[in-house]
């Protein structure tokens, strides 16, 4: 009987921990975004001139209006992320596939993370780093387990900013809880 009781207690404990984890995830996914400081809008190209094209051999420069110190910088218009270390030198940069719901420009902090889950689009994802919420939609970075980065379904409201798996690994290692995330236009 004692063996049976300890099995029941262990099962109940596991169920309680899973329920608490699930409720914590739901709370973080529905928490309102709290931008700390709005970022300035980048200047447009002079009238009659096309915007400068990025040299593929040279990494894109970190946006000047993204602040200082260690941070993740996400440019919605450039579809690009920079992982900027304390010294600011040689940041890792890569392209991403934005979601259908975008965070407002500003400064945020990583509020929750998950190693592997199913995205709101029904796709298995990994290395989920959540930093904002807009209209009840959790916004964060993630990589699809299958490695693809298709355009999102515009009919669905999703907040998953997708990246290649190797970039997802780098994001996971860099953007821990309370890490700064700066969103620029």
Image (cartoon, rainbow, N blue to C red):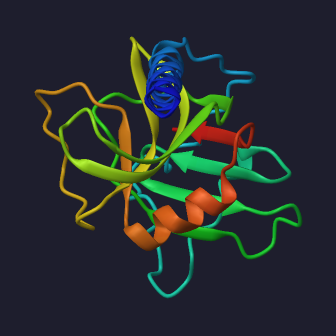
Residue 76 position, x and y percent, is 45, 43
- Which corner quadrant of the image does residue 179 belong to? top right
**Is residue 31 shown above or below 58?**
above
56 vs 176, left or right, is: left
Q: Residue at x 41, y 57 (%)?
A: 49
Residue 39: tell me if it is visible.
Answer: no
- Nearer to me, 32 or 28: 28
Furthest-front residue in this view:
1
Residue 31 position, x and y percent, is 54, 13
**Is residue 170 shown above or below 12?**
below
Furthest-bottom residue in this view:
57
Q: Residue at x 58, y 42 (%)?
A: 43
**Is residue 123 shown above or below 170?**
above
Q: Residue at x 79, y 63 (%)?
A: 85
108 vs 33, left or right, is: right
Residue 34 position, x and y percent, is 65, 16
Count of numbered circles on the image: 0
70 vs 39, left or right, is: right
Q: Residue at x 43, y 58 (%)?
A: 51
- Nearer to me, 82 or 60: 82
Residue 145 position, x and y percent, is 29, 61
80 vs 165, left or right, is: right
**Is residue 57 shown above or below 149?**
below
Residue 19: tell me if it is visible.
Answer: yes
């Amino acid at each position: 009987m004692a063996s049976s009781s300890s099995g029941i207690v262990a099962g109940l404990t596991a169920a309680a921990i899973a329920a608490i984890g699930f409720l914590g995830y739901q709370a973080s996914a529905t928490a309102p975004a709290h931008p700390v400081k709005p970022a300035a809008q980048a200047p447009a190209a002079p009238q009659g001139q096309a915007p400068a094209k990025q040299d593929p051999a040279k990494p894109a420069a970190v946006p000047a209006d993204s602040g200082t110190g260690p941070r993740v910088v996400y440019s919605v218009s450039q579809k690009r992320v920079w992982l900027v270390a304390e010294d600011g030198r040689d940041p890792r940069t890569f392209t991403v596939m934005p979601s259908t719901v975008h965070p407002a420009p500003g400064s945020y902090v990583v509020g929750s993370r998950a190693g592997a889950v199913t995205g709101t689009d029904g796709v298995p994802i990994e290395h989920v780093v959540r930093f904002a919420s807009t209209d009840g939609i959790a916004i964060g970075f993630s990589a699809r387990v299958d490695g693809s980065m298709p355009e999102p379904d515009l009919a669905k409201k999703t907040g998953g900013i997708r990246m290649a798996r190797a970039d997802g690994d780098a994001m996971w290692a860099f953007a821990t809880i309370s890490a700064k995330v700066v969103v620029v236009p």
